[in-house]
Amino acid sequence: MSDAAAPPGRPMPGVRDGQVTERAACVLAPNPSPMTLDGTNTWLLAEPDATEAVVVDPGPEDEGHLRRVIDAAERTGRRVALVLLTHGHPDHAEGAARFAHLTGAPVRALDPRLRLGEEGLAEGDVVTTGGLELRVVPTPGHTADSLSFQLPADAAVLTGDTVLGRRTTVVAHPDGRLGDYLDSLRRLRSLAVDDGVSTVLPGHGPVLRDARGALEYYLVHRAKRLAQVETAVENGYRTPSEIVAHVYADVDPVVWPAAELSVRAQLDYLREHGLV
Ligand SMILES: [Zn+2]
């Protein structure tokens, strides 16, 4: 889910179904909204010659969508052998159990409540289904259970809701915490700076071909919002809703309830650091 900032530069078209990198194809779920942008990006990943595919985030429990994901795998002669979840929000994870039933594939996630099968996911895990290498990168902050998946062969990283293809994301207080989120953005930026990652495959919105630029924009945006919240408190704005109406005056009020979660996370952060 997204919150608020104006996009950098021109608006970009949304992701469309189809192959995005050599190993990653997108199947867009039919759940567009102010919070989900064009809808959830379900990712279908496979090595070029493999007969097994990995699906990241089956998306909402929408039978037509889930069957389109399976069809997309079968059209290329593959079966879905594994499902991974970036986090537990329903627009990413609600359809996982039904999808697992349809495909027979296990579901792996950080949160044990989301798993189906024996295996979870944790820091340092490397998934190698069908020869495809995915490195598990914990990126808490949007939620406590948020993961990213590095796809080194395509110089890409799947970020779920930690980085979106357009606008910025919500720090979903109280589960999501701003300090964690800033650490996660820095961790992703180091993948771009030191480990060759150039492409972001986000959970919503278009693919980003300048991963480093996107992460630097996110870090600058977060610092700017935090400074605005700090100033608002100093100027006597007290409640989260007062602060949202003041600081987020430039964005569509339809996303204010989400922005309020981010403001609560920012207030916690400022208090923990003795800044307000
Ligand atoms: Zn989410």
Image (tube, grey):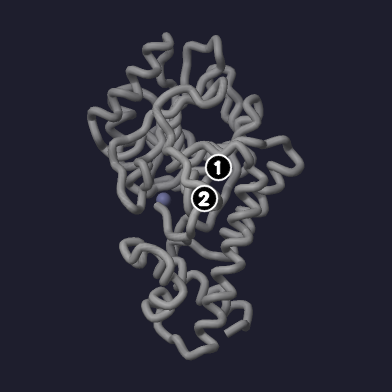
Vertical arrangement, residue 27 with respect to residue 183, above or below: above
Location of residue 58 in the rendering, given as x and y in whole percent from the top left corner: 36, 34
Tell me which residue sits at (69%, 42%) in the image: 192
In the image, farthest residue toward the right = 194
Coordinates of residue 160 in the picture (x, y in percent): 48, 43
Residue 274, quarter of picture:
bottom right
Q: Nearer the viewer, mark 1 or mark 2?
A: 2
Q: Nearer the viewer, residue 231 or 152?
A: 231
Say which element carries label 2: loop
Say which of 144 and 21 sits in front: 21
Residue where numbered disc 2 is placed: 162
Horizontal side of 90 relative to 143 (left or right) equals: left
Q: Secondary structure at mark 1?
A: strand
Label 1 environment density (alpha carbons within 10 Å; few <14, some 14–19, many ≥20): many
Is residue 109 at least partly visible in the picture? no
Instruction: Say what amino acid the circle numbered 2 marks.
Output: Thr
